[in-house]
Amino acid sequence: MEQSVARQLDYLFSPRSVAVIGASNSPGKWGFNIFNRTVRTSSDIRVYPINPNAEDVLGVKAYRSVTEVPEPIELAVIVIPPPAVPAAMEDCVQKGVKAAVVITAGFKETGKEGAKLEEQVVRIAKRGGIRFAGPNCNGHFNTAVDFHTTGGGAKKGPLALVSQSGNFGGHILQRGAARGTGFSKYVSSGNEADLHLEDYIEYFAADKETKIILAYVEGLRDGRRFLELAKKITKKKPIIIMKVGRTEEGRQAAQSHTGALSGSDEIYDAAFHQSGVIRVDEVDDLFDVALALLRQPLPGGRRVGILTSGGGFGVVATDACRRFGLEVPPLVEETIETLSKYLPPRWSHANPVDMAGDTQGSYPSLGTLLKAPNIDAVLGVGCVGLPSQDTDRYSGAASDRAREYNRQMVEGELNLVDGLIERVDRYNKPLILTSTTSSQLSAAIAKLERNGIYGYPTPETGAKVLAYLVRYSEYIRESGNN
Amino acid sequence: MEQSVARQLDYLFSPRSVAVIGASNSPGKWGFNIFNRTVRTSSDIRVYPINPNAEDVLGVKAYRSVTEVPEPIELAVIVIPPPAVPAAMEDCVQKGVKAAVVITAGFKETGKEGAKLEEQVVRIAKRGGIRFAGPNCNGHFNTAVDFHTTGGGAKKGPLALVSQSGNFGGHILQRGAARGTGFSKYVSSGNEADLHLEDYIEYFAADKETKIILAYVEGLRDGRRFLELAKKITKKKPIIIMKVGRTEEGRQAAQSHTGALSGSDEIYDAAFHQSGVIRVDEVDDLFDVALALLRQPLPGGRRVGILTSGGGFGVVATDACRRFGLEVPPLVEETIETLSKYLPPRWSHANPVDMAGDTQGSYPSLGTLLKAPNIDAVLGVGCVGLPSQDTDRYSGAASDRAREYNRQMVEGELNLVDGLIERVDRYNKPLILTSTTSSQLSAAIAKLERNGIYGYPTPETGAKVLAYLVRYSEYIRESGNN
């Protein structure tokens, strides 16, 4: 990335001074919420409301134009009707503003007239050396400096997201928040009149706080650059993309949305495959895969060892593994012998390993499967995560005994977690756990998650995640040999 | 169903007196939890612990054998080691017990010896006219009389579940509970040595409290009977089945699990299709589809009108509809004219209807799409469900204004809900809403859900549910013509 572009994206994500052009005192207006968000940010960032019809906005002295602000402005957030945007951008040029976010919609996506207006804004910005996000976007944030122009109040974390749809970007952020995931940076790229998806991805690649890059894509404007960039980045930092427009009707909807050049879906598939980009189909996949990539070793092959508390889980997990192209190989004699030490006599003696309702041997059995010579990854289903609070209701006499017993069991399980994590590292194989409980209900799962081993809700999800890890790992190994 | 079998299943689900053979004072043993659950039930049901080595179990006087109980026993729950089960069943016959649940594992599923033992138990029970669930199962419940031999404490509701896997049955119940769904009855059918899946389905079909029948199936033992039964039932009460063993490896795992005759997956597909059974692939699908079937009208065709708050949602929803075989037809002139009255000038003027960020017209627009002559079902994405609490943090000056504005908006939305529900009924078309908020966050969604219009978490889920409704509706229409 040119040094100057990276610097200007610094102004976008970490400005020291901000003007909100269109800041408003009227709740319900975008200019109300955006100004409120920016003004609430860390006190290191000075925020100025620009509004020719107000003395102040939310108690902060307002200016008629950005040119009247008595200090240099690094970032302008523009949220005024479309016809007024060129003049506002002109003011920004005059003021020496470095970067802008144009929230305003009503440009290229609305037709010819809008496209003309958009070109005008681009010309003005270019003349002043201003790089900008949007128009027709819903803002951005940088949790490292607690600076938000978009809502939702995302918390800090290792994922960066660029979205070609503002509403879908918000949806992705909300789904992430619902499962406790944090974000480093977010940007809704809108019509990408100036800054493109590729610029943000390149910036996130160099960003210390970002471990994994997520993107919602309707269409790429610069396919060749994307391909070259992605090839370099994915060797070090995974890129996970939800690309929509799989169907002709979906592509048409995308074209009328942000005017993206959609192109055939097969070409995208091939490009993502060649560049190591992980393409997913649904929002939740973004997080399911990202959470596994944050900590888990990549599998050396597609052979999965399955451990379950009962037969039904084994059937569902095996079905799912096969469906996603994974293998469930027979166990070698040595593995069977070792497992027999930990499991009741009626265990399945086969892969999937069915513990037949007795989960006492779960942890050493998971360790045994991790060690097994013909197993590349382990999928545990319903075998860890005793609930800290039993879901049964107890009558008086049963209550004390049950409580003490549960306490001991939960404590016992908690003591086994460290050893299991050590084995994941020692054998360098991923361990995907799917549990009928969750980190809210189980101290063991909470501890595993604090150590980067996430619990997935269903066996199908676990198998799907493993399949993504396998494909990414294959790409990394093959591209390493080139 | 023979009257006598129905009567005996009444004894299973609504016994007046119960003996728990193997009731235990040791937490961690199944006999501890099962006795605790049954004894906690409504006081109309008398529960007796059977344990030759204890004076009492959890404070209740214990008996050495069921034959020693001073009253008639309608149901025996058997949870003792396998070799002791035949003698216990013999005692039950002698006592005149009507029905039993054999929890104990270690029968046919473990091999030849176990199969012999199982046959012995069947012979004894048959001689005494005892019908029984299991062996190798994890119990059952009937919420109407608050009687539970299995854990988890399910709440009352309209879904009945029969599961050929105990652990997966528990998983299904937990996933249902996690989304607030209630159940009427549940049974883990285990090895089905006596009572088969078909018996339970027939019983649930006649059960007043059950509106929809769910099943987890590894293999049918009586395919022809299933087919005949299902054909009759599905015309009145939907049957939704998660049938596993789609892959050869999955079928093998199923065979070693409960010894089910798995058969080819294609045969199952055809059988379900012919009998109107809705076959789903994943646990969450069971509930997604069931919740829609509880209240929504069935669509008259596969033409979907999509309303979204923004373009990205429209693209994803259109893609998903096409992927699931639904149509997204152009709107007729009249619909476009009416929508233009409610929507901002920049709305998409096409299907998907993109409101371009302005959700003020959501409710009348949904009503307009429901009314449209060439639309059979409506999918609304991100257009209803204002959060009752704004996720933005506000600074002092913004706080009061924002709070008052939000209150008015939420109240305004709440007033529109009744009219929307009325239109669903008037035009007799299903309305599937997917929202970025939930019933916990939005008073409007909570009100819609109280009226049976559920909010789904993603556009893909909504489209998938609609596709299931369409196929079921097609079956009902076609079978009605026969």
Image (cartoon, coloured by chain):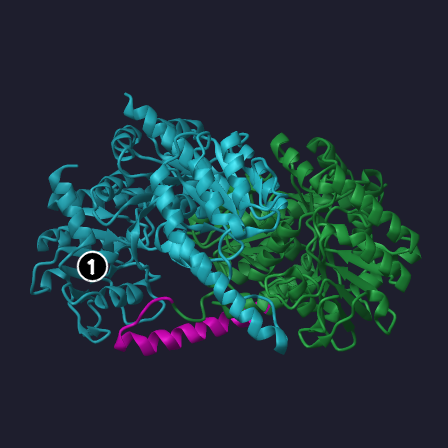
Chain colours: A cyan, B green
Please indicate, yes or no, whether residue A401 appears anywhere in the rendered image: yes
* Front residue of this view, candidates A175 and A361: A361
Q: Position of residue B403 (x, y in %)?
A: 37, 76
In which quarter of the view is residue B182 placed?
bottom right
Would you place residue A81 above or below residue B164 in this image? Answer: below
Q: Which residue is most to the top?
A: A482
- What residue appears at the point 31 percent right and 76 percent down from the top-left corner? B399
Would you place residue B205 above or below residue A119 in this image? Answer: below
The range drawn in magenta is: B391-417
* Front residue of this view, candidates A112 and A146: A146
Q: Is residue A22 left or right of residue B83?
A: left
Q: Position of residue A267 (x, y in %)?
A: 40, 27
Q: Is residue B128 left or right of residue B379?
A: right
Write down the chain letter for disc 1. Answer: A
Would you place residue B445 above or below residue B200 in this image? Answer: below
Please indicate, yes or no, whether residue B329 appears anywhere in the rendered image: no
- What residue appears at the point 16 percent right and 66 percent down from the top-left corner? A64
- What residue appears at the point 48 percent right and 31 percent down from the top-left corner? A303
* Crowding near the residue tagged with mark 1, few <14, some 14–19, many ≥20 C-alpha atoms within 10 Å: some
Q: Is residue B194 left or right of residue B267?
A: right
